[in-house]
Amino acid sequence: MNLKSLTGTNNTNNRHNPIQMIKQYRLLLLAVLLIGCKKEPAIELEDFNLDSKLSTFVSAKNKHKTYTNYYQIKSEIIGADTVSDGEFIGSEQPIRIDYKQQMFSQKDVIARFGDFEFNAINFATTVTGKLMVFNAVAGKISLKETQRFVQLLNEKYGKAVKTKSEFIKPFDIYSWQLKDRIIKYCVVSENDSNALKVGTDKDQQTIKEGKNKTYLKAFIYIIKKEYADQVIGKMSSGDLLYCE
């Protein structure tokens, strides 16, 4: 960035003028701050529009180049799966379409609520494309951050109802009931046991398995109230199953 273009002057005599130099540095600092504060584009979850069309999230431009019924948003791969009622074998009726992440990167920012960032999304629609539930995932988050996020939602929507559920291990659920939606925030304890962790034993000069690190993973669900009975506790796979 050209400092002269920020100050609007080419007068070389100003270089020894302390007041002019302070002005120049202030302008330069302001320009740097403005550039640094620019947020990465993401789906805004605060005051989320539950009447959004499917193309708001995935469209032809996001279709995976290799696999049918898959989409790619940044590093995230999303698979579309039609779910049937399963009541009568051979005559099942489709009841919804799940869009579930298959892989994602914690470096990506796909969605955002205020200053809190989420790395992946999942959602479900009716067979006609109406949004039933929208979910965003924070791949790794600290306890302090989850507490701050719950506090933010408490201030915006009122005090949450806290419950517990269990899938492999217990997890906390915070729920807010609004006029047109139900918001749920689930905090799940995870570990990196699925990743290969190796370390070196200095004495024996051999490689051994490293210790698994436990961390928190967070899920926010924005559920359209008219579909609550079809969504809450009805999901059986992927990140949507924590919607209890």
Image (spheres, rainbow, N blue to C red):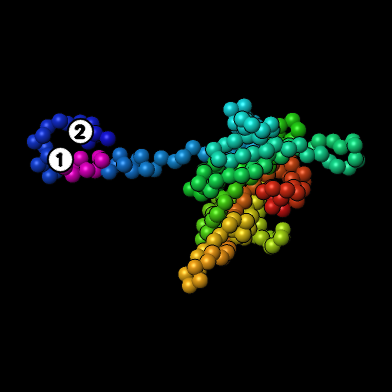
Residue at image position (9%, 42%) is 16
Seen as rendered, the residue at the extreme bottom is: 203
Q: Nearer the viewer, residue 153 or 123?
A: 123
Seen as rendered, the residue at the extreme front is: 205
The mark found on residue 20 in the picture is: 1
Q: In this view, does 72 lie above or below 155?
A: above
Q: What kind of element bears circle 2?
A: helix
Binning the other alpha carbons within 10 Å of mark 1 as few (below 14), some (14 to 19) or many (20 upward) gives some
Seen as rendered, the residue at the extreme top is: 60
Please state the horizontal and vertical placement of residue 121, each as a whole percent of the image.
61, 43
Tell me if 97 is positioned left or right of 220 in this view.
right
| Quadrant in the rendering for residue 8 | top left
From mark 1 to mark 2, how far is it between C-alphas? 12 Å
Amino acid under label 1? Gln
The magenta segment is 20-28
Q: Is residue 235 magenta?
A: no
Q: Mark 2 points at which residue?
A: 4
Amino acid under label 2? Lys
